[in-house]
Image (spheres, helix red, strand yellow):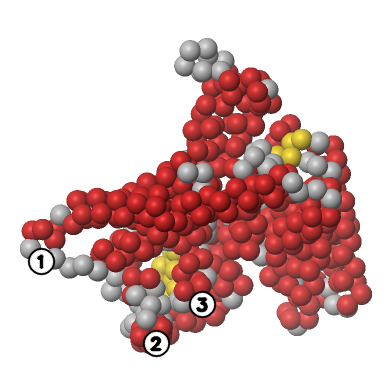
Amino acid sequence: MKFVGVTACPTGIAHSAMAAEALETAAKEKGHDIEVEIHGASGAEFVDRQVIREADAIIIAADATVAERNRFEGKPQVEVRLREAMDKPGEVIERAERAAEQGESEESAEAQAQEEDEGVPTDMGGSGWGAEVRRWLMTGVSYMIPFVVAGGILIALAFALGGAVEVTEVNVYEDFTIPAMLFTIGATAFGMLVPILAGFIAYAMADRPGIAPGVVGGLIANEIEAGFLGGIAAGLLAGAVLILLKKIKIPGGFGRIMPILIYPLVGCFVVGALMIVVIGQPIATVTAGLEDWLGGLEGANAILLGLILGGMMAFDMGGPVNKTAYAFAIAGLEAGAFAPMAAVMAAGMTPPLGLALATAIRGKLFTPAEQRAGQANWVMGSSFITEGAIPFAAADPLRVIPSLMIGSALTASLSLAFNATLQAPHGGIFVIGLIGNWPLYLLAIAIGTVVTAALVIGVKEFTGGSDQEKATSEAA
């Protein structure tokens, strides 16, 4: 058979490519041809239309909205979570085989039944409310991250070169300096994170008509200081309003101008009015409380927060739980609390670094493929790419994931206890000059790395059966 695959994750750094490789390998083992379209941080190179026409079925493995899905209309489709394609690619291929043989999308009947039972609008999918809301939020986060990274690092560089007070008081258009320019550009980019988040949450829900009302709602959230939470609320509100507007069917010429005139006009007004009059101020109050809490974190409270954030970062290594912790740290950046961001980045670096150390010390406990991955993890861990730990966790989840979570929780707690701060939301070791109290910060990462490696080695040694031995046994 011939399949077309699409993989898409919110950040597009590693998960998309890893899922694509897993699907390609599984398809080849079963004697099929597959061409996978990877939606990553650089966008996507779309599969040729002729390849789609010749395909027996389409496999969509995505944790974010896939652009231009109408290309696949009329083809049997199988839609799964990205992690499912990575962990069980053979089963996904088998589901695509069945869909191709039956000539219909695998979940069509089940989804329709669920929609009828639960009253879920067809525009909002048939995977259940929880999965849909998570996809909407992850789509918004995926489009927001470039603004956060660029803005945060530029602001941090401006403060490092010119001082926090000085650069904020300079009018760059009248008194040009490099630090002031960096701050102005960075602040502009960072100021867009809430509108972009809101706009693309609405886009995930209602397609292009949702973008304008979502962005407007996000800008109003900025104005009333409702922050990150306000952006999420504005995006969900805009998406819901546009879904309802799109259900209004008007025949004739007036119906054709609905997307051009009515959707943006009514959508922006309704969303803006509700943000101003109804939901904006309560969310702003909650946001102010969150900012006060973050600003007052110290002692036992800080250590507890570190344990929670660190464990979340290592739990699914780039998945939704990881992204939730990362989003919390971004909310802290926006609130002027820079310690959670440092803790989250340290906790995200520890899993791949710990596994790299473990494979270097006790290589016989790991398969040859894991040993090679361990070498690459020195770079991935140093770059804050937590996904480097996924192959190890997928192969041995019960022993590896708890070890990673303990190491990351310890690292994040130490980072907060050492009062390390970070204004740049990414970069790993390459932004070390922007980290407050960096010597102790590096010590926290080193301790977490050693503890992670020791735990992984220990559980493999004392529970019996290394990955190498299991691989040899399975081959036999």
Residue 73 or residue 93, whichever sits in front: 73
Q: Quadrant of residue 25?
A: bottom right
Residue at the far left in the pictured view: 252
Alpha-carbon span between mark 3 and mark 1: 42 Å
Closer to the chain start, of discs 1 and 2, is 2
Q: Tell me whether the residue at label 1 lies in contact with that at label 2, contact meaning CB atoms closer than 8 angstroms.
A: no
Amino acid type indicated by mark 3: Val
Residue 30 vertical placement versus 10 (above, below): below
Q: What numbered label is drawn on residue 117?
A: 2
Image location (x, y in percent) of residue 8: 49, 60
Residue 95 or residue 272, whichever sits in front: 272
Alpha-carbon span between mark 3 and mark 2: 26 Å
| Neighbours of disc 2 within 10 Å: few (<14), some (14-19), many (20+) | few
Residue 70 vertical placement versus 174 (above, below): below
**In this rendering, position of residue 316 left or right of residue 52:** right
Image location (x, y in percent) of residue 15: 58, 60
Residue 206 or residue 223, whichever sits in front: 223
Amino acid type indicated by mark 2: Asp
| Residue at 15% over, 54% down | 257
Element type at mark 2: helix
| Residue at 64% over, 40% down | 336
Element type at mark 1: loop
Closer to the chain start, of discs 3 and 2, is 3
Residue depth check, mark 3 versus mark 1: number of the one nearer the observer: 1
Image location (x, y in percent) of residue 353: 78, 52
Q: What numbered label is drawn on residue 251?
A: 1
Q: What numbered label is drawn on residue 92?
A: 3
Q: Tell me whether the residue at label 3 lies in contact with that at label 1, contact meaning CB atoms closer than 8 angstroms.
A: no
Residue 58 vertical placement versus 415 (above, below): below
Image location (x, y in percent) of residue 252: 7, 63
